[in-house]
Amino acid sequence: MRGSAPEDEKRTPRPALRRSTTALAAAMLLLLPLSGAPSASAGQPRADRLQRAFTEAAARFHVPRSVLLGVSYLESRWDGHGGAPSVSGGYGPMHLTDARTALARAPEFSQGDEDARGDSSRGRKPVPHGAAQQAVLPAELPARLRTLGTAARLTGLPAGKLRTDPAANVLGGAALLAAEQRKLGLAASGDPARWYAAVARYGGQDSALGGRAFADEVYDVMRRGQTRTTDAGQRVTLAAAPGLTPDATQQKRLGTPATKAAAPSGDSGLECPRNVVCESVPAPYEEFGDNDYGNHDKAERPRDQKVNVIVIHDTEGSWDVTLKLIKDPKYVSWNYTIRSSDGLIAQHVPTKDVAWHAGNWYINSHSIGIEHEGFLASPDAWYTEAMYRASARLVKYLSRKYDVPLDRQHILGHDNVPGTTASTIPGMHTDPGPYWDWAHYFTLLGKPFHSTAGSHGGLVTIRPDYDRNQPPYTGCDKAGDTCAPHGSTAVRLYTAPSESAPLVRDVGLHPDGSDTTEGVNDTGARATTGQRFAVAGRSGDWTAIWYLGQKAWFRNPHGARTAVNAEGLIATPKADREEIPVYGRAYPEKEAYPAGVPYQAVTPLPYKITAGQKYAVGQKVSSDYFYAPTFDVSKHAIVRGEDVYYEIQLGHRVGYVRAADVDVRHSDS
């Protein structure tokens, strides 16, 4: 019961859904109302073949090449994803949907055995153990789930070729765009500005507002331009057109835009930027049972407590399942969910209130939690460009609203949130995982990671090339099985400058002394894009950092750097201290607690920082504790202490050290 449990236990997320399999992603097609990012064909013999395919398709169907490239970029970033369909059954660079085929090729799936840590570290609630499941499609699929068939009729190409041949797929996408233009009664103009309405229709959104959001993102891509090498080694370029604006008359053809719903908890408006699609799905604040309540706490942030962290999650469940859970007062909560297929944002808890999302009450009290529909082991099916872009717009909005810096010390993954005590560390969640593209995400935030110092700056920022960095992982589909090769945001950490050396150990994650593994959920020897660490040594192509109280080595070869030089503040034990403790929360000293508020012990984590070690400082925080034991807000209190803490990059997760225990100085001193 919440009334009797320690405060941190009350807000620890409940047991989780087990990890998805590739088959699970395909089997959930009908749970998603819209189309999202795609997947398609294998590598091509010439690096410019895909670029030429866009040129030829544009000429054949009289669609501006920039429009074709812009639509495809938003749908897939021009990637093929090894031929796998997206979660909504989309194939190829143009995301042509064939849901029936995608599902027919997905075998029945069953949830595999939990790993040694249990999947309480993953997502939400458990699926019945070993229960085989299979989605059932209706006799007549919605048009948005069968655009590939329409493209086959328009082009005369076989459906199989449209699924597997990128050039054919692009041709099919051009045919669909041209068909949408004709349906609108518009000529096949060579002016990109006159294709706005057709682009909105192509996006497959379920509302006029959603179509506008899709088209707005496409035109933003065309204005800015893009160049990238796809996952199949294809180099594709979309030249920037900074002066491009859609024809004003086009928007009228889309109908009257939908109005935004009332915000959660009766506020006057949704807390979303104007350039996203946002709706209200309120989380309940209700009493139930014997003096119990849920699923969040009323507060008055930032007046009573500062918001200084935004936590990025993935749901480990579908949109429909996630929305059912957020409406359950006996479940946990978060502030927002973002849909994979189109970037639709649902707000659940006002940002002034405290949602129960991080498994760390101190972090909850000072953070906003954003869930992203998807499964960390199936990034190509779920982590779509539409979702990344909508999320980035939301985070920029929240950053301005609460003055949260846009860096990896303030924008944390759920997998970066520390356990509060030694016993909670093994059960901490690991989303959004090693396949979440932090570099791309921060580029969308307008804060790309780059070198900020020379070789003597004293810090490094982890920054591998996402597509080329493919460390092996296991357990994506079944425990122990090797995951398919895939770009990753993380680098592996070793006890010595050699890949034959053991991985560094995380004594908190593996308290039994067992070795760190290559499991996709094992964060024990992992440094992630954007994180800053203090340099502990260099040897040839290897760099060492201070990590969980030890030297940790990673490959950082000249010409293929996996980290860039940086500078900033570091914390190191005071000169008279042989070692200092590190904590998972920044709670006040015992003397700060008034009568009637139980003291919350600040228990050290099982890591030691010894003399001479250095850790990058993220932020300086005052100690406080939000006491919220009941539904009656009049009994809530905020305890403020004299102790001051520094957030440091301790390992894969952050930690806190008392200011009284450390000296803080510039890293190059």
Image (cartoon, rainbow, N blue to C red):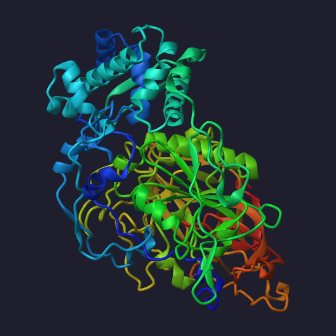
Question: Percent x, y for residue 355?
Answer: 63, 67
Number of dots carrying numbers = 0
Left or right, 297 with reference to 181: right
Q: Which of 596 and 620 is in front in this view?
A: 596
Residue 110: image quadrant is bottom left
Q: Nearer the viewer, residue 35 or 450?
A: 35
Q: Which of 463 and 204 is in front in this view?
A: 204
Question: Percent x, y for residue 189?
Answer: 43, 8
Residue 608 seen in the figure: no
Residue placed at 37% from the left, 74% from the top? 126
On screen, residue 431 above or below 359: above
On screen, residue 331 above or below 615: below
On screen, residue 258 above or below 45: below
Residue 594 seen in the figure: yes
Residue placed at 35% from the left, 17% from the top? 178
Task: Locate the N terminus and report the quarter of the image it occupies.
Answer: bottom right
Residue 180: image quadrant is top left
On screen, residue 615 above or below 606: above
Residue placed at 44% from the left, 24% from the top? 199
Question: Percent x, y for residue 87?
Answer: 33, 48
Task: Locate the C terminus and report the quarter of the image it occupies.
Answer: bottom right
Question: Percent x, y for residue 107?
Answer: 17, 57
Q: Nearer the viewer, residue 244 or 273?
A: 273
